[in-house]
């Protein structure tokens, strides 16, 4: 793999949007464009606990994205890192791009003293689960949501 994974830079926005939209489409979700702008600004703001990485092919084209959020936990003395979103362009799957993006988040988590890195996926996302089962441990927890 000759791809590069690095933190987002301001000029990456135009390449991030289509991947973000593809990710939202995959999960059958629509967000207002104002949320795109808010999310992007948070990902670039060093005062925010949110971080983002892009995977780029040898031509400089963004082919994958991931977003992570640091938070405290009642169960650990250290920070916890939640890998909230991960998306790799359909044509780039199976080339370890997703694994490289996860490892970039893991490196960031280690560098910031996090005691845990975790993420969620839908039970029907079999392609992602094959990767996740290979590189991490399934905690067995099921997520519930209550609308507020």
Image (spheres, grey):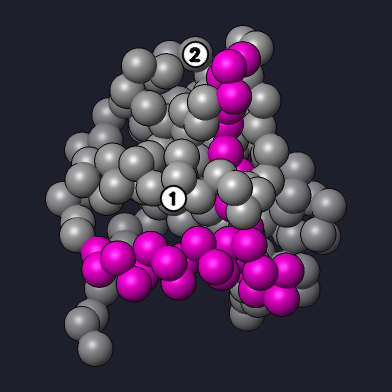
Q: Quadrant of residue 37?
A: bottom left
Question: What is the x, y in percent for residue 7?
Answer: 68, 46
The answer to whether the residues at label 2 and label 1 have Cβ atoms under 8 Å apart is no
The residue tagged with tag 1: helix, strand or loop? strand
Question: Does residue 22 appear in the picture of this structure?
Answer: yes
Q: Residue 121 versus residue 69: which sits nearer the camera?
A: 69
Q: Is residue 115 left or right of residue 56?
A: right
Query: Which label is found at residue 85?
Result: 1
Question: What is the x, y in percent for residue 117?
Answer: 62, 52
Q: Residue at x 31, y 58 (%)?
A: 142
The residue tagged with tag 2: helix, strand or loop? loop
Q: Residues within 10 Å of mark 1 (few under 14, many from 20)?
A: some
Cα distance in 3D space between marks 2 and 1:
18 Å
Which stretch appears magenta? 31-60
Q: Quadrant of residue 105?
A: top right
Question: Does residue 117 appear in the picture of this structure?
Answer: no
Magenta span includes 126: no
Query: Which label is found at residue 6?
Result: none
Question: What is the x, y in percent for residue 137?
Answer: 52, 39
Q: Residue at x 19, y 59 (%)?
A: 30
Magenta span includes 37: yes
Query: Which label is found at residue 95?
Result: 2
């Amino acid at each position: 793999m000759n791809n590069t994974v690095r933190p987002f830079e301001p000029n990456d926005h135009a390449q991030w949007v289509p991947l973000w939209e593809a990710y939202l489409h995959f999960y059958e979700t629509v967000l207002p464009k104002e949320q795109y702008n808010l999310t992007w600004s948070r990902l670039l703001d060093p005062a925010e606990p949110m971080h983002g990485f892009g995977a780029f092919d040898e031509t400089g084209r963004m082919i994958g994205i991931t977003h992570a959020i640091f938070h405290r936990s009642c169960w650990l003395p250290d920070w916890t890192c939640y890998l909230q979103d991960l998306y790799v362009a359909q044509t780039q799957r199976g080339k370890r791009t997703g694994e490289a993006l996860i490892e970039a988040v893991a490196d960031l988590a280690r560098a910031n003293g996090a005691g845990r890195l975790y993420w969620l996926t839908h039970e029907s996302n079999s392609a992602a689960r094959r990767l996740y089962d290979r590189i991490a441990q399934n905690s067995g927890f099921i997520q519930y949501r209550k609308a507020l």
